[in-house]
Each structure stands twice: as structure tokens, then as C-alpha cells.
Amino acid sequence: MIDTYVYRIDRDNRLTAVGANWDDFLRANAGDPSAASGAVIGRSLFDFISGLDTIQLYHLLLKKVRSTGRTATVLLNCDSPTVRRKMRLLMQPGVDNAVVFRSAVLAIVPRDPLDLLRAAETRAGGFVTICSFCKRLALPEQTWVDAETFVGASAHFLKDAPPRLTHGVCPDCYRAALEELSQLG
């Protein structure tokens, strides 16, 4: 059985409903308690999306879904410190310019715990960009690698505490989002 997580936004991009398994997913991934189902209803979707590139792509996708009445499909990762999670996100048009999001888990792969992805209180001074979609990280020369490769290549950088993560979009995911936009018409 494929786990699917559903949520809905209204025409103003405010969350109006979340699926019954929302809080279970949050607890299983040590998520931020401020994102519990009771706390998110009425808040903007964009309160939960970071990075200007990511926000811009979501705005463009939502605009296309609403204007064409067609479903957008985005492949993404929803990783935790101990699990890699491949997902397919459908953005489906709803009544009165609402949009329904359906995130289906396609694969789950355990990983050795990574402090880099843990919600840590203590972080080093620097910033590292993580792709909002695939969860690869940018090395200084703008090569995008998975978290394990990043940790191996940056051991000297990570010795005291993991860096702060800032969200962006890698070139591959940016191209994929633009391709999806063009497919929507």
C-alpha cells in the first residue's frame, strides 16, 4: 500500500484541510510541532516553504494548475536524518480555485543517521544550500550531491557542528519544474 498525504489550499493559498495521517507523519519524522494539523489550518502554504526559487516555482505551478485546470506532477524527496523518502506530489485543481495536494510515497530507504539533516539547535556559522525538491546539497563549486557525499566531502567543515541549511533549487529540479510548467500548457 502506498502512503499518501493530502492537504488542500484555498484561492488565497491558505491551508483549509489536511489528511487524517498528517500528524502521524509529523511525529514519525520528529517534525516541528507548530506544523501539527490544528496549527496549520488557516495559515499560508508559503509559511512552510523556504527559498525564493522554491517559492517562485510553487507560485508558477499553482498559477498554471488554476488557469489550465490540469494537474501538475512534481517528483521530490522528503528526507529525514534516518530515511530517504521518494515522493510524487500532485497539485490538482479544486473548486473555486482551491488546489488539492496529494503526496504519495514511492520509496523509503533507511540511512545511517545524519546530523546534517537533524533539526539541531546548535549550528555552525556557515550556510549550505539544500535543494527543496531532491534534497541534494551544493558544494562550493555548485556541484549538487546527496547528503552522504556532502558530509564526506565536507568533513573538515562539519567537525564542530552542522552548518545552517538554506533552501534553493538545483539546476536539475529547476529544469524539471519548468518542463512540467510547459507540459501544463
Image (cartoon, rainbow, N blue to C red):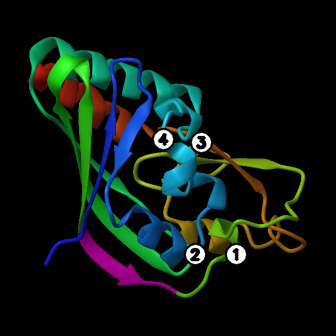
Q: Residue at the location (19% across, 30% down)?
A: 180
Residue 84 colored in magenta in the image: no
Amino acid, disc 1: Asp
Of the two numbered discs 1 and 3 on the same chain, state the one appearing first in sequence. Answer: 1
Q: Residues within 10 Å of mark 3 (few under 14, many from 20)?
A: many
Confirm or deny contact between disc 3 and disc 2 (CB under 8 A). no
Secondary element at image label 2? loop
Of the two numbered discs 1 and 4 on the same chain, state the one appearing first in sequence. Answer: 4
Magenta span: chief secondary structure: strand
Quadrant of residue 91 within the rendered picture: top left
Residue 49 sits above or below residue 105 on the image: above
Q: Spatial distance from mark 2 to mark 1, Cα to Cα?
A: 7 Å
Work out whether residue 163 can be spotted.
Answer: yes
Q: Spatial distance from mark 1 to mark 4, Cα to Cα?
A: 30 Å
Quadrant for the N terminus in the image:
bottom left
Foreground disc of the pair 4, 3: 4
Q: Residue at the location (25% across, 74% down)?
A: 107
Secondary element at image label 1? helix
Confirm or deny contact between disc 2 and disc 1 (CB under 8 A). yes
**Residue closest to the far top:** 67
Residue picked out by circle 1? 115
Of the two numbered discs 2 and 1 on the same chain, state the one appearing first in sequence. Answer: 2
Q: Residue at the location (35% across, 67% down)?
A: 21
Quadrant of residue 162 within the rendered picture: bottom right
Q: Residue at the location (27% across, 43% down)?
A: 101
Foreground disc of the pair 1, 4: 4
Residue picked out by circle 3? 167
